[in-house]
Image (cartoon, rainbow, N blue to C red):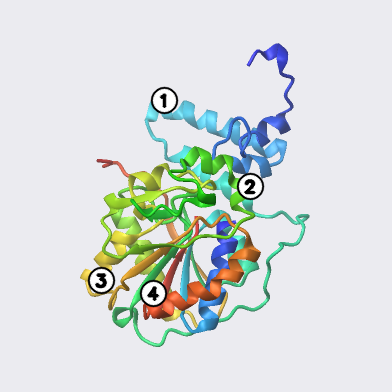
Amino acid sequence: MCHVSVGHVARALEESGIPTVTVMVKAFEHRAREMTLPRTVIVRHPMGRPLGAAFDRVRQSEVVLASFQLIETASESGTIVELPHTYRPNPSLP
Amino acid sequence: MDNSERDESFEAFRKSFSYGDRNDLNFKFFKGLSDDDAASFLQTMLDQLGDAFDTGDVQPLIEAAIQAQVAGYTPGPDAPPPTFAYDHGPFTPARIPVADARVGLLATSGHFVAGDDPEPFGETAMTQAEAIERIGEFISESPVLSEIPSTTPTSELRVRHGGYDIRSAEMDPNVTFPIDRLREAHDDGRVGSLPDTFFSFPGATSQGRLRKVLPGWVARAHEESIDVMLLVPV
């Protein structure tokens, strides 16, 4: 349901002139395709952890920066890129 | 429960993980698996757990769970058509590099600032367990957008969402609401500026009611002079 909600938010923002990029876990990639989201970064992470594991600052930053890159490179709606990383639980939980 | 009082089918067992008496938001996808696929998944998990007894390596368990989530949610060839499908999507090209842009954040993570609880359905201090119990009301009611100052310390963030396992987001909000990562990107010069306000709401909501409030949300984004919006569903 969250992914459908974001699909509608993305459409409304794009129609108003604000470009969007969505970070989505692989399990919901079909939503990005069904709703023709403008730009989607797919991550092979578990549900509820789209940016990466808790305190995995490196992975979280990689996902954010990949999203920025897609903002600048996508030329049409429905652009999807999948990051190659596998999920890793952070070994250094505080 | 006394086994003599319970004659449970495997199908009922599967479905109990999705808001049933074994509710587990990490594994509610069991409901969408076939009996054979669910049995195969459990067998795989137990086999790999046996390996982990010796190796200590839980990565294969995690990978199997992620693959099962993908299988559980991806529609099969006989699935009914989705309720919300669009052949074409609106598209606004980026006008300036992100390094010069004001980058906003809107997540369906259910975060809010301590002391600014959106109080769903007028309920003060709703717990996560109550949000799970009332998921049916959430998906039929209007969403409430929480405004989160972009300078908010993560220690001041709270999260509640009846649709996903929030344990990770409680430990580190950045897993669903990457506020620190955006601040770092700004500090590093990868982002031009940040708006005063980021946004979050529980994305399990009525789509019809969401679309009615969206014009106001879009107006808020423009008031914040946002050039690019990062969206994070959970």
Checking the image for residue B136, the label placed there is 2
Task: Mark yes or no: residue B167 visible.
Answer: yes
Dot 2 crowding, Cα within 10 Å, few <14, some 14–19, many 20+: some
Depth check: B37 or A40 in front? Answer: A40
Query: Where does residue A39 sit, x and y in percent of width and height?
Result: 50, 73
Q: Which amino acid does label 4 sit on?
A: Gln
Alpha carbon separation for disc pair 2 and 1? 40 Å
Q: What residue type is labelled 2?
A: Gly
Alpha carbon separation for disc pair 4 and 2? 38 Å
Mark 2 or 3, closer to the camera: 2
Horizontal arrangement in the rendering, residue B95 relative to residue B22 (left or right): left
- Residue receiving disc 4: A69
Depth check: A50 or B62 in front? Answer: A50
Q: What residue type is labelled 3?
A: His
Query: Where does residue B129 sit, x and y in percent of width and height?
Result: 50, 38
Dot 3 crowding, Cα within 10 Å, few <14, some 14–19, many 20+: some
